Image (cartoon, rainbow, N blue to C red):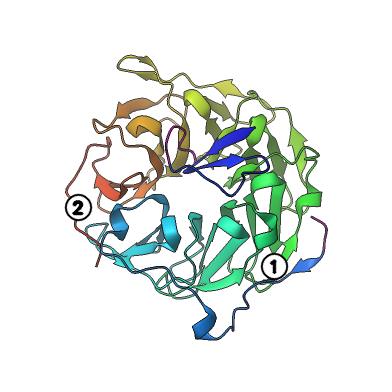
Amino acid sequence: MSEPVMGVVVCRPPALRRFALLATALSLLGSAVLSAPVLAVDAPASDIVFSVESAKASKSLMLDVVHAGARLIAVGDRGHILYSDDQGQTWTQAKVPTRALLTSVFFVDDKHGWAVGHDAQILASQDGGVTWTKQFEDLTREAPLLDVWFQDANSGFAVGAYGALLATTDGGKHWEDASDRLDNEDQYHLNAIASVKDAGLFIVGEQGSMFRSADGGETWEKLEGPYEGSLFGVIGTAQPNTLLAYGLRGNLFRSTDFGSTWEPVELQAARGALEFGLSGGTLLADGTIVIVGNGGSVISSKDDGETFTVFNRPDRISVSAVTAAGNGNLILAGQGGVRATSPNGAELSAKPVK
């Protein structure tokens, strides 16, 4: 079987490493301490393969975009990592020691961040995304990591295909295989991890799988979710214990009790119910929730996720991630690169990468 995940299609054997790029569905181990088995952090520069510099990098497939302080950071195809210090008007390509597809990025402050991707790669930056080092890589997994989350500069998790859950308590110097903390016998792909206000951590994935932790990820409880299809994203809201989970065909669910119970959120587009897959979301400073997905879908809520306004971009370009630009606009990442938009998702002019 194959499972569409934000920006890639994660396939069961033997074709896991062959991923389609946003064609139809854009939505994407024991307790031993792990270290990079292929390339050490202090490897000679001559042995490191860096991403190719390209003036068109900002127009290539980008799968995630976040803030590092006031700076914007985007990651995507061929190891490209871009940063912008002018609210997304121009982008500069960072020096990155990989050419693998990067699927997710997370910063805990304006300096410290991590990016994950294919071949179970984990990259780290300590200068706001300008330069990166490879912390971990495992070619034998033949599987991507799909999301990453950190509590602070030391403690974090990465999740991915075949139930991968990696944990670190030293900023990524060592990664522990923590998948045995989950009751995930079928090794369902784990697509996203997020924190929920005043509650804990939440993971969603393949076949509607859900896991929650109230103790910082030390132990996890498996939940019976509201949906048997795959969930590509999860986001906590501004209210305690409240979160949204979303995935295939516009399925969106809201919980106010940390996932114990769920209610479906109906999404109505101009031509009827929204049926495009939803893949990435963000919580803006004013409490507005924005979620994006296939077909140029940009949906937003100002009432903590109870109701949403639906907008489909005219270009129908699939979008994988969204964040605030810092000037009232939004930054979208996905097919066709990174672009600035108005709050309702309409296109704004953009300048090329430096």
How packed is label 2: few (under 14 Cα within 10 Å), some, or many (20 or more)?
some
Task: Kindly report the secondary structure that dominates the magenta region of the rendered protein.
Answer: loop
Q: Amino acid at mark 2?
A: Ala
Q: Which residue is painted at 42% across and 24% down in the image? A: 307
Quarter-wise, where is residue 75 in the image? bottom left
Percent position of residue 92, x then y:
30, 67
Q: Work out whether residue 262 can be spotted.
A: yes
Q: Is residue 12 left or right of residue 309?
A: right
The number of callouts visible is 2
Q: Nearer the viewer, residue 119 or 72?
A: 119
Q: Which residue is painted at 45% across and 37% down in the image? A: 26
Residue most toward the top? 272
Percent position of residue 90, x then y:
23, 61
Quarter-wise, where is residue 53 in the image? bottom left
Percent position of residue 179, x then y:
76, 51
Q: From the image, state whether disc 1 or disc 2 is nearer to you.
A: 2
| Mark 1, secondary structure of its residue | loop
Q: Is residue 239 left or right of residue 219?
A: left
Is 70 drawn above or below residue 333 in the view shown?
A: below
Q: Work out whether residue 76 can be spotted.
A: no
Query: Image quadrant for the C terminus?
Result: bottom left
Q: Nearer the viewer, residue 22 or 213?
A: 22
Q: Please give the range of residues in magenta.
A: 22-31
| Residue marked by disc 1 | 169
Percent position of residue 9, x then y:
54, 40
| Residue marked by disc 2 | 350
Q: Amino acid at mark 1?
A: Thr
Query: Image quadrant for the N terminus?
Result: top right
The label shown at residue 304 is none
Q: Which residue is painted at 44% across and 32% down in the image? A: 24
